[in-house]
Image (cartoon, coloured by chain):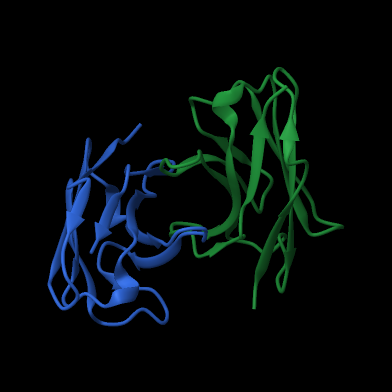
Amino acid sequence: QLQLQESGPGLVRPSETLSLTCTVSGGSISSSGYYWGWIRQPPGKGLEWVGSIYSSGNTYYNPSLKSRVTISADTSKNQFSLKLTSVTAADTAVYYCVRHPRGEAFDYWGQGTLVTVSS
Amino acid sequence: EIVLTQSPGTLSLSPGERATLSCRASQTVSSSNLAWYLQKPGQAPRLLIHGASSRATGIPDRFSGSGSGTDFTLTISRLEPEDFAVYYCQQYGSLWTFGQGTKVEI
């Protein structure tokens, strides 16, 4: 059974960089045909796709966040990571990592981790 | 960017009743690349429907999806107590975007 687990600081200062890691177990992030992505949800609000990395290493980002987002993968650790620079209070959210097969919906989700941006 | 608009924002129903949720896209969603998710408080979303009308593994048949092009519908034939939650549509034909959600409340 595939499992995804987010980890990282729960509190980030304004203007700093938010860094999260998703550890995948029960499957390999190197497997062909899969994207590994990040979704966020501000408290009490809806879901927003942040970005995804394909098994080939190609990355895709939400146009509204593209200038601040980097997603990378470490196949040796079976992990992928999110970096979001110059954060503000508007970046406070629960961040989920997800798997989505090519041409398919998001079928596996992590439990989510709350990141608060505050001084 | 494809914008998805869900309606209504909130649906107030009783157990046993039928729920009909709508999702309208600003552009045609290619190949019916439209999914529905259910989210309960404090939990991650769960995939219900993909390909506009295919139920995900383990999803009961009281959930059904329909539609194509720009208009899609999720129907819950008889609401069970565990179905009261927030539902999101999502398109995955052109990058990935979500609707704003419909809350189904008792």
**Between B57 and A92, the one nearer to me in the picture:** A92
What residue do we see at 42% from left, 40% from top? A45
The chain painted blue is B
What residue do we see at 37% from left, 60% from top? B37
For residue A7, side relative to residue B41 (left or right) = right
Q: Is residue B95 above or below residue B46?
A: above
- Residue A92 appears at what percent x and percent y? 59, 33
Q: Quadrant of residue A14?
A: top right
Q: Quadrant of residue B59?
A: bottom left
- Residue B97 appears at what percent x and percent y? 39, 42
For residue B14, side relative to residue A41 (left or right) = left
The residue most toward the right is: A76
What residue do we see at 22% from left, 50% from top? B10
Q: Is residue A98 above or below residue A14?
A: below
Where's the N terminus of chain A, which quadrant?
Answer: bottom right
For residue B23, side relative to residue A14 (left or right) = left
Q: Is residue B71 above or below residue A61?
A: below
What residue do we see at 73% from left, 41% from top? A10
- Residue A102 appears at what percent x and percent y? 50, 57
The tint chain A carries is green
